[in-house]
Image (spheres, helix red, strand yellow):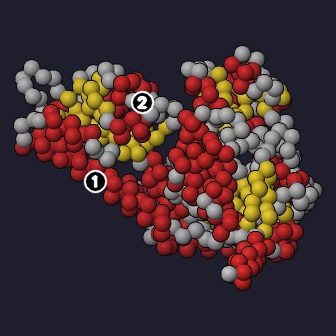
Amino acid sequence: MKIIIILFTLFFTTLHANTKNISVQLRWKHQFQFAGYYMALNKGFYKQAGFDVTLFEGGANINVVESVLSKKAEFGVSNSSLVIDYLDGLDVVMLGAIFQHSPNILLAKKEFKSPVDLVKGGPIALMGGDQDIELKAMFLREGIDLKKVNFVPKQKHLDDLIENKVVAINAYSSNEPYLLAKQNREFSILEPRAYGLDFYGDTLFTSTALYEENRKMVSDFRQATFKGWEYALAHIEETVEVIEKHYNTQNKSKEHLLYEAMTLKKLINPDFIQVGHSNPGRWEHIVATYKEFGVIKQTRTLDDFFYAEEKHSNMTWVYFYIFISSLIILVVGTIAYYIYQMNKKLSKSEERHKILFQNSASAGIVWKRGYIVTDWNEQAARLFGWSANEVRGKNFLDFLVSENEREIIKENLEMVPKDNNLHIFINQNILKNQTLITCEWHNTLLLKCSEEDDYEIVSLAIDITQRVQEEELLKLQANNDFLTNLPNRHFFESMLEKIHAFAKRSNTIFGLAFIDLDGFKEMNDTYGHYAGDVLLKELAKRFQGAIRQEDTIARIGGDEFALIFHPTNEKESYEKMIERLLKLANTPVQYEKEMSLQVSASIGVSFYGHDNPVSIKHLISQADSAMYEAKREGKNCFVLFKG
């Protein structure tokens, strides 16, 4: 027996000795923002990976990066500003972006709907340093000089907004809007994403030293953390209970924590994007935004900033998601169609309707003349946020549909009671928390129980917001160049076919120009591919801004662009536009503070018309031949193909 006890003791002593003590510095106080770390602890994911983890609560005076580099903690939670620290020479490695979109917003008084409104309104309270650059950048995107904006340091935060001392404050979409809503106060939200500023939120990181010394340990911790996040987001009620019991230092209510959880889940998007995923291209965009403010001087590449080399996205799961969404829509349609068939074949049974309606897998409302809600199922309450008692007897157009869509939707809905057909519409809807979603609605008429009854309509809805977003993403990736966001060769050739066919039918003319950059290869070989990418993106932006809306410019190869343009008649001069493109191509592009990049362009032009009614293949050959003639004539010029 003594031997067994000794062996038992030795086993657990050895097991304990193999457990590594790890600490993580959080960037703020305990809340659902750090739920993944709590659940990795609570569910034993860290222990299974061989870690005994301690979480250090953050606060206003905690410098997370300093804590990690001084070895007070092995890992830390920062945000997009981590790349500033890296480019300033600090040895940090970004292990993964937890929040795919930043929750940082401007929370404003209800009458202020845009940055322009705020400039005229009064003081705006932000955090100091570089923490709210994405909020300031919204004003730049609207062409507003930041010197004209009255930014003031944050003091009493939400109280200052309530007491009208400021017109807007920095806030988290998962926190302050809930507090104002609980006080029945109206407000406006300005999101950087609406202005093309899509920063990452919380990011997990470590020191370069630890990463290089023990990559396996870093990898194991990283995977255990992501597993904790996946569990937390899949079991929100359980996670909130864990926070309430062990981590609720801010004394948040369960309702508040659940609101925070659902808001952050949308920003993390675990159903569509793998937890921890980050895109180097987005980081470059973030760096470019920081450069606009002069807060960084890029003296190193981002290669050592990332945990691992990014792989090309496998879009198979996107198609799978769209397939599943379509399948769900089919089910919804089947339910709506079943109701429709019941109306035609059966005498109306109110009890049958209620059973089917209330147990539908989709959000459903029943309404009568005047768009007045008569019934509202549990799924509708979950999706839109209002309970049945809150909406019965009300016109749903007043709260569920934005003003700019109401007239169109009225026109569509007026057709429904005129027949027994199934009517399907897609439109945007407003949730109780003022979020916009896209829904597909299946509408059909319920038969009257008696001649005295007025008609009722049953409308079933499914949230297709993500499906629409992903279809747009697929369309963008199929038709646009990933680097410059200009149309790609595939889209350009498709457009050229349509324009050529139209010109042939209508006996009109159009021009085709091939643009090839002179000296790009030499510049790329000298300064590297990143410099080449910077130049291509800048020239693409210039070219796009120099052409008319009806014209099309595309990137069709490495340093090759093509332009389709439409003179109104044969006598209209095109030379000025082509010369403008030559000048833009030859204008230096700022690369680093004391360095610029410069190339030129050779352009070949050909016209389709009654004087040159050639095929697409020959038209392309003509423009290409003229472009090479421009190079032979000394480059930085254009040549018109003359046959």
Tell which residue pokes out farthest to the bottom in this image: 3
Give neighbour class at mark 2: few <14, some 14-19, many 20+ (Cα, 10 Å): some
Q: Amino acid at mark 1?
A: Val
Residue 404 vs 637, above or below: the answer is above
Q: Nearer the viewer, mark 2 or mark 1?
A: 2
Q: Which mark is residue 386?
A: 2
Q: CA distance from mark 2 to mark 1?
A: 24 Å
Residue 56 vs 173, above or below: the answer is below
Is residue 348 at all visible to an observer of this figure? yes
Q: Which mark is residue 331?
A: 1
Q: Residue at x 58, y 44 (%)?
A: 240
Q: Nearer the viewer, residue 474 or 243?
A: 243
Q: Quadrant of the C terminus?
A: bottom right
Please state the horizontal and vertical placement of residue 158, each as a whole percent of the image.
71, 25
Q: Quadrant of residue 347?
A: top left
Q: Quadrant of residue 197?
A: top right
Residue 325 vs 367, above or below: the answer is below
